[in-house]
Image (cartoon, rainbow, N blue to C red):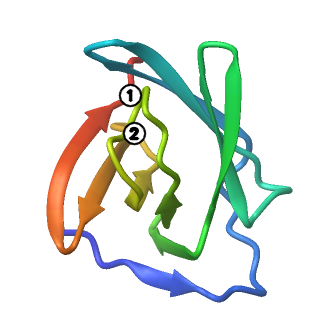
Amino acid sequence: MEKWERIGDDEIACFGDQTWRFEIPNGTYSITALQSEQNQISVSFGYNTEDWPIQQKEQAGAHFKLCGLADWTPEILESVCWFELFTGPNPRISYWGDRILLRTDMAVI
């Protein structure tokens, strides 16, 4: 099990610029994280793009976990929830609601 260490709000998480694509039953969506933009990720679905705030950054070795509030996006989520975006060899995003894992979407590589 990886030991995650929190990265301070004023510290830079060196995760580079990355984009992942996720498949869900009603289509696909993508998430872009830019190292120069440490306080948000961009979520794109169809012709729409939304920014979700990053409220917590963690690191385990060369891997990062970016966390925050996922806005209600009917194409992707049924309600506002907490997200955890994991970088690394098996990128994924997990959605949580009131301490219950709602689902995890694996990136299509």
In the figure, 76 relative to 63: above or below?
above
Quarter of the figure that contains the C terminus: top left
Identify the residue position indicated by label 1 in the image. 107
Residue drawn 29% across and 35% down? 105
Lower position in the chain sequence, tag 2 or tag 1: 2
Which of 96/62 is in front? Answer: 96
Q: Is residue 60 visible?
A: yes
> Does 87 sit left or right of 1 as displayed?
right
Considering the numbered disc 1 on the image, is that residue within a helix, a strand or a loop?
loop
Quarter of the figure that contains the N terminus: bottom left
What label sits on residue 44 in the rendered view?
none
What count of labels does the image hold? Answer: 2
Local crowd size for mark 2, using a 10 Å CA cut-off: few (<14), some (14–19), many (≥20): some
Question: In this view, which residue lies farthest toward the right?
Answer: 36
> Does 62 sit left or right of 13 as displayed?
left
Where residue 35 appears, as percent x and y from the top left, is 77, 54
Identify the residue position indicated by label 2 in the image. 91
- Residue type marked 1: Ala
> Does 7 sit left or right of 2 as displayed?
right
Considering the numbered disc 2 on the image, is that residue within a helix, a strand or a loop?
loop
Would you say the residues marked 2 and 1 are in contact, meaning their CB atoms lie under 8 Å apart? yes
Quarter of the image where one finds residue 10: bottom right
In the figure, 45 relative to 55: above or below?
above
Q: How far is mark 2 from mark 1, CA to CA?
A: 6 Å
Quarter of the image where one finds residue 61: bottom left
Local crowd size for mark 1, using a 10 Å CA cut-off: few (<14), some (14–19), many (≥20): many
- Residue type marked 2: Pro
Residue drawn 65% across and 89% down? 8
